[in-house]
Amino acid sequence: MKFRFARGRRDELATLHPACFAMVMATGIVAIAAHLHDLPQVANALFWLNALFLAVLVLAAGARLLRHRREVAADLCSLSRGVGFFTMPAAAAVFGTQLDLQRGDVRLATVFWVIAVVLWLCMTYGLLPVLATRRDKLPLAGALNGGWLVIVVAPQSVVILAVLLAAHGAFAAYEPALMFAALTLWLAAGALYLWVITLIVYRLAFLPLGPKDLSSPDWINMGAVAISTLAGATLAEHAALSPLVAEVVPFVKGLSLCFWAIATAWIPMLIVLLAWRHLGAGVPIAYEVLDWGGVFPLGMYSASTYNMMTVVNAPFLAVVSKAFAVLALAAWLWVLAGFVVSRAAARPSPA
């Protein structure tokens, strides 16, 4: 038994995956984790690199929409690729959070929050109904994986940025209403996680599962509940902004701790499944754009653990948070190397 490696497939504009914005999500959360653990040079370098990634991906997505409308329309109706569009609002919110935490630019962060909210509303009440009303649906085993949980990640990232902006006075006249909306959305997204993860666990436990049925997005099983932890901890930390939220702080802390425990419990299982896929079954390790969806949960677990440590006064969790920050940075470097190698691959010859 040994790991096998292969060169990843080069993505072209026509085949660009809707989940490509996970690259921004992953880079952003690793930068935030580095910022929290006093690694300013790493965090600053990742911030500017992420700004470049975001600009290039926005241009690429716009060019694809103009030049390959048929492929974009097919993705919008695809049960396997369609939910990847939810990485767009999540990426906007994560980058807005970077602007707030790393640069102190509240105004520009607010602009990105508005963009994230608009995109999230469009995806939730535009894209999801399209997928829900399809007649020719795939079997559960073929359609559902951890990637679907990005529909939880997106609203929770909106919640986090909303609370941070409120704490910096961006919505001074509407703080109680905004905090109430953030609390409500946090709870709704948490419930959505429980609904979707129930189906995912059913698929893992009771439906045939081959090694190729597992992939990097399955790490979002952990990442989606980790970001729910971070959103809850952020609400609890800034509960003074709203009398209503202040009244339910013990509940918010308790549910956040529950989310963190679920995220923690997922990690050993995902490691075992990863080893079975690559070491036991011999599936080669090769870059694909969805690998960024495996980096994001590691950075998110570091950030959520850091905030939980502060909110529940558990300083012994600092070593866990720091270890996952290092692990997330290593995973980010590994996936970035795979991306560079795949881009250096020869273009496929025209038919």
Image (cartoon, grey):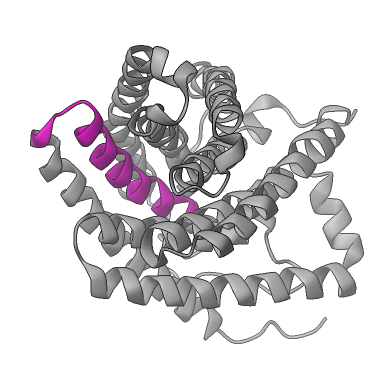
Instruction: Indicate the position of residue 75 as horizontal and vertical percent values.
Output: 79, 52
Is any atom of residue 81 visible in this view? no
Residue displayed at 48% across by 16% down? 244
Is any atom of residue 6 visible in this view? yes
Q: Which of the two residues, 318 or 142, is positioned nearer the viewer here?
A: 318
Instruction: Indicate the position of residue 146 as horizontal and vertical percent values.
Output: 53, 36
> Left or right of 186: which side holds 5?
left
Instruction: Indicate the position of residue 170 as horizontal and vertical percent values.
Output: 54, 49
Instruction: Indicate the position of residue 64 as horizontal and vertical percent values.
Output: 80, 71
Return the residue found at the far front.
173
Number of disc labels: 0
Residue displayed at 88% across by 72% down? 66
> Left or right of 147: which side holds 34?
left
The correct choice, above or below, for 20 with respect to 85 in the image is below
Query: Overall secondary structure of the magenta stretch?
Result: helix
The correct choice, above or below, for 336 with respect to 235 in the image is below
- Residue 214 in magenta stretch: no
The correct choice, above or below, for 232 with respect to 12 in the image is above
Q: Which residues are magenta?
A: 293-315
Residue displayed at 20% across by 45% down? 321
The correct choice, above or below, for 299 with respect to 190 in the image is below
Q: Quadrant of residue 98?
A: bottom left
Q: Quadrant of residue 142?
A: top right
The quadrant the C terminus occupies is bottom right
